[in-house]
Image: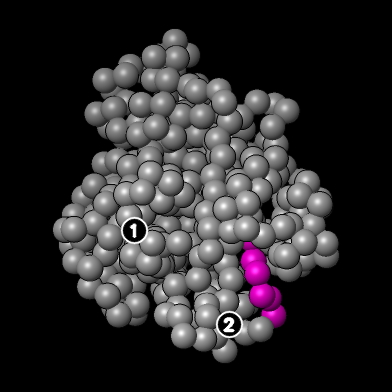
Amino acid sequence: MTGTRIAALGHYQPAKVLTNHDLAGMVDTSDAWITSRVGIRTRHMAGPDEPVDELAAHAGAKALASAGLTPADIDLVLVATSTAVDRSPNTAARVAARLSMGSPAVMDLNVVCAGFTHALATADHAVRAGSASRVLVIGADKMTAITDWTDRSTCVLVGDGAGAAVVVAAGEDEEPGIGPVLWGSVPEMGHAVRIEGSPPVFAQEGQSVYRWATTQLPPIARRVCERAGVTPEELAAVVLHQANLRIIEPVAQKIGAVNAVIARDVVDSGNTSAASIPMALSKIVDRGEIPSGAPALLFGFGGNLSYAGQVIRCP
């Protein structure tokens, strides 16, 4: 068994931007109401001709190019999504086809907003076990397609996008770049975040999610750091699921990462579910806000109520 690392990242968002002022013309809301409650100012919205697998493929292609790899180099594709329309072919298979890959294993994972960190852990396990050598891990969601645009409590939250990471084996003399995962769920509260019905619609019990996230998640996140052998003070970045700025800021403070860059991509992108963590991380790395090799805490949480986190070393 060997350790793994993230070789490169990539992200993609549709061109159309939906502002708070745009939403104020659609439902009874305002820029002040939205920013005061969730901190979001803009979000990107995919069109009817932009399916989830297209968003995912764009992000995946950017990650591969950054890693200096070709699609044929990948032997496992994992896509975390909860908004794919079709059951088969799955999103990972469609991404592989769009990128003209060889014959990779293709799997979708539906763990909603915690999907990317679950998929990243699965990629780490696959490489460590020897069943894969180079894995393309993507979080992609088209939340605007499952939104009730008459419900101002949820339609102001969502955006579309995708983020990707290329996971490879660490060198023999190289420190592992993906730490142990800590994951779990609270099944009795699974109803608090829902995508149900036909057609499916996103709904949530906002106050229940807020209380759970701000009180229960910080000690779990600190345990993630313990498993990785780092203290919160040593973290260079904290990338939480970009659900709501009023959740992100208090949770980050309670974790105790006093020296870390805190990802706040939710302000510009909204809640993009499984895409939120890889998109936010990719942007921080692109901007040079954290150096290569620096430790970053990734922590996803949301539907089911599921959570998963690990400390990674930035590519």
Disc number placed over residue 128 in the picture, else none:
2
Of the two numbered discs 2 and 1 in the rendering, the one whose residue sits closer to the viewer: 1
Q: Residue 14's spot in the image, x, y percent?
A: 58, 31
| Magenta-colored span | 131-136
The C terminus: image quadrant: bottom left
Query: Badge 1: how crowded within 10 Å, few (<14), some, or many (20+)?
Result: few
Q: Which amino acid is tagged 2?
A: Arg
Q: Residue 53's spot in the image, x, y percent?
A: 70, 44
Res 79 visible: yes
Disc number placed over residue 291 in the picture, else none:
1
Q: Which amino acid is tagged 1?
A: Pro
Residue sitting at x 61%, y 78% = 127
Query: Residue lying farthest bottom?
Result: 1
Q: Earlier in the sequence, mark 2 or mark 1?
A: 2
The N terminus: image quadrant: bottom right
Q: Indicate left or right for 202 with 34 as reference.
A: right
